[in-house]
Each structure stands twice: as structure tokens, then as C-alpha cells.
């Protein structure tokens, strides 16, 4: 599986270890990865259309991953999103199948499954 050259992914998480690990993984397979320690930092960065996909934690400080998704989709309605969580009840509440451009993943992440999900999401036209 070879990523398309020039694809840029945003990673939003308040855990620096998660940010660093995901950035290393994604860059090792050819993606450009930009990391943000908070949703506010990501949203204030400017043009969201420069990103091809957003990977975000659900449980963060003042804005959670669902609120971030809503803010992103308000500006970029077709943006693919991967929402990560350590909680099992999120999928149980029926969120998982509600949007084909949204993928839920449980932490700890499986690298192979994550890369497959990214490939699938990036296949959607924007």
C-alpha cells in the first residue's frame, strides 16, 4: 500500500506521545503529517482545505473530537475524519456507521488498520 504523494493529514490530540507516534508512522509511508495539541490550535491554523484528512482524539480539553468534527465540517463538509478513542461506548452508541467519511478507531491503534482506513477515506472525491 503506497500513499498518494503529497497527501497531507492533520493529527489533533492532547497527548504528545500519540502525536509523535502517528506523525512518525504516517511520514514513514509517505504522507505529510501536521500535528496539533488542541482543536483550537488546529482550527486557528487557517485554510483547512490544505488537509486531505483529519485524525483526532475524541476526549480532549475544552473541545472534544465531535465538536471539532462539527467545526471542520462547517468549513469543509466533505473532509474525511478519523476519530480515536480509548472508550468502547462510543461505537456502541451508533455513531460508527452514520457517515461514510468518518471512521472510529479504538486506542491503542492498529497501524495496519489505520493505514487501510486512511487509504479508503482518501479515495472519496472532495
Image: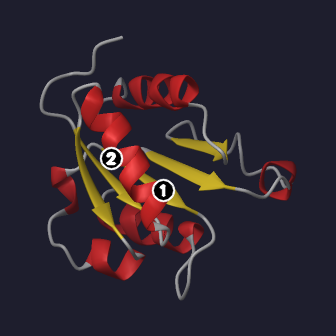
Residue 36, disc: none
Left or right placement of residue 6 versus residue 122 in this view: left
Kind of element beneath mark 1:
helix
Q: Residues within 10 Å of mark 1 (few under 14, many from 20)?
A: some
Q: Position of residue 22 (x, y in %)?
A: 41, 46
For label 1, the residue is 18
Q: Quadrant of the N terminus?
A: top left
Left or right placement of residue 88 versus residue 73 in this view: right
**6 up-or-down from 73: above or below:** above
**17 up-or-down from 120: above or below:** below
Q: Quadrant of residue 121?
A: top left
Q: Position of residue 65 (x, y in %)?
A: 55, 67
Tell me if residue 126 can be seen: no
Left or right placement of residue 18 versus residue 124 in this view: right
**121 up-or-down from 13: above or below:** above
Q: Residues within 10 Å of mark 2 (few under 14, many from 20)?
A: some
Amino acid at each position: 500500500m503506497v500513499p498518494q504523494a503529497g497527501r497531507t493529514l492533520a493529527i489533533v490530540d492532547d497527548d504528545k506521545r500519540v502525536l509523535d507516534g502517528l506523525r512518525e508512522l504516517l511520514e514513514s509511508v509517505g504522507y505529510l503529517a501536521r500535528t496539533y495539541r488542541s482543536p483550537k490550535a488546529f482550527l486557528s491554523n487557517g485554510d483547512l482545505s490544505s488537509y486531505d484528512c483529519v485524525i483526532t482524539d475524541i476526549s480532549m480539553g475544552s473541545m472534544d473530537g465531535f465538536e471539532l468534527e462539527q467545526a471542520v465540517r462547517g468549513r469543509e463538509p466533505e473532509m474525511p475524519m478519523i476519530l480515536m478513542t480509548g472508550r468502547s461506548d462510543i461505537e456502541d452508541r451508533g455513531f460508527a456507521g452514520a457517515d461514510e467519511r468518518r471512521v472510529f478507531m479504538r486506542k491503542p491503534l492498529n497501524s495496519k488498520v489505520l493505514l487501510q482506513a486512511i487509504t479508503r477515506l482518501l479515495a472519496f472525491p472532495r
